[in-house]
Image: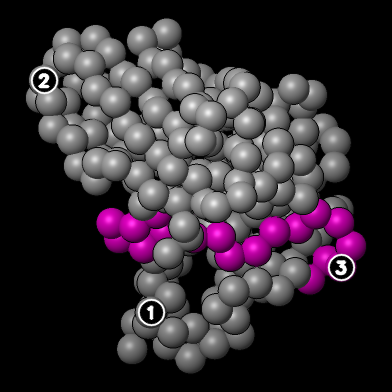
């Protein structure tokens, strides 16, 4: 158990809908990262927040957004869902802002199925 | 651009034999390299990382990795494989480009199968 929690574990929804994925980092960690894992794209970095501020951005679609709250938990919002958004979404956390010695610890993931 | 390649989709070894999972990288600056393992229906578990220093890095569960700068490789190794090591292994490199934070770039993964 990494200490990173994600809810829900599974999410099934329809095209066009909006969902929210939640992540709680390990105690003491200030950074939260979101990754998407799919069969065709592999593991892709979406976005990182550090102490409430956006730190780095990857290939995140405009339909997706995220935020980190004062208690450091994070939410990933996915809207206007398409079939291709079906994937496993991982949250990771680290102590620092992502520097060279920082290690990311991953949560169990949320499996999103869009029908 | 930073990239990581895992040339083998699958590696098969017999229990008790040594195992190697290969990884090569391409970076513009200093490489910060990681290995993670993913068991079915589980998240990624951190195994080890190379930041600087000794070329042989020791990690969790008896795994180690050898950093080779001239060959731009970071192969994962274990002297004696266990059936319970069967899983999906990912090599990753941290993006050293300014303002990319801790973004990790992952390889496509290698499925390790250890048979009794």
Q: Which residues are magenta?
A: B38-56
Q: Nearer the viewer, residue B68 or A103?
A: A103
- Looking at the rendered structure, the secondary structure element under dot 2 is loop
Q: Position of residue A100 (x, y in %)?
A: 78, 45
Percent x, y for residue B38? 41, 59
Q: Which residue is mark 2?
A: A14
Q: From where the camera sits, is residue A21 visible?
A: yes
Residue B84: assigned label: 1
Q: Residue at x 17, y 14 (%)?
A: A17
C-alpha span from label 3 to label 2: 51 Å
Secondary structure beneath label 1: helix
Percent across and percent down for residue A105 are: 54, 52
- Residue B75 figure quarter: bottom right
Mark 3 and mark 1: span between their CA atoms?
28 Å
Same subunit, labels 2 and 1: the answer reads no
Which color scheme is applied?
A: one colour
Q: Are marks 3 and 1 in contact (CB under 8 Å)?
A: no
Residue B106 in the magenta stretch? The answer is: no
Query: Which disc is residue B44 wearing?
Result: none
Image vertical order of residue B50 relative to residue A32, above or below: below
Q: Residue shown at 59%/81% (left/top)?
A: B62
Residue that label 3 marks: B54
């Amino acid at each position: 158990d990494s200490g990173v929690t994600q809810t829900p574990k599974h999410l099934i929804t329809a095209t066009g809908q909006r969902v929210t994925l939640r992540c709680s980092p390990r105690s003491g960690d200030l950074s939260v990262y979101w990754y998407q894992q799919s069969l065709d794209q592999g593991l892709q970095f979406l976005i990182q927040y550090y102490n409430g501020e956006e730190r780095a951005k990857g290939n995140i679609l405009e339909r997706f957004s995220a935020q980190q709250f004062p208690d450091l938990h994070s939410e990933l919002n996915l809207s206007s869902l398409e079939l291709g958004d079906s994937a496993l979404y991982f949250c990771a956390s680290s102590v620092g802002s992502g520097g060279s010695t920082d290690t990311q610890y991953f949560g169990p993931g949320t499996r999103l199925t869009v029908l | 651009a930073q990239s990581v390649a895992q040339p083998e989709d699958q590696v098969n070894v017999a229990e008790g034999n040594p195992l190697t999972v290969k990884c090569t990288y391409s970076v513009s600056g200093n490489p910060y390299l990681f290995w993670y393992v993913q068991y079915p229906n589980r998240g990624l578990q951190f195994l080890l990382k190379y930041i600087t220093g000794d070329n042989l890095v020791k990690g969790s569960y008896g795994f180690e990795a050898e950093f080779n700068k001239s060959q731009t490789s970071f192969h994962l190794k274990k002297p004696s494989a266990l059936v319970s090591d069967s899983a999906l292994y990912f090599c990753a490199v941290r993006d050293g480009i300014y303002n990319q934070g801790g973004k990790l770039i992952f390889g496509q993964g290698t499925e390790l199968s250890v048979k009794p």
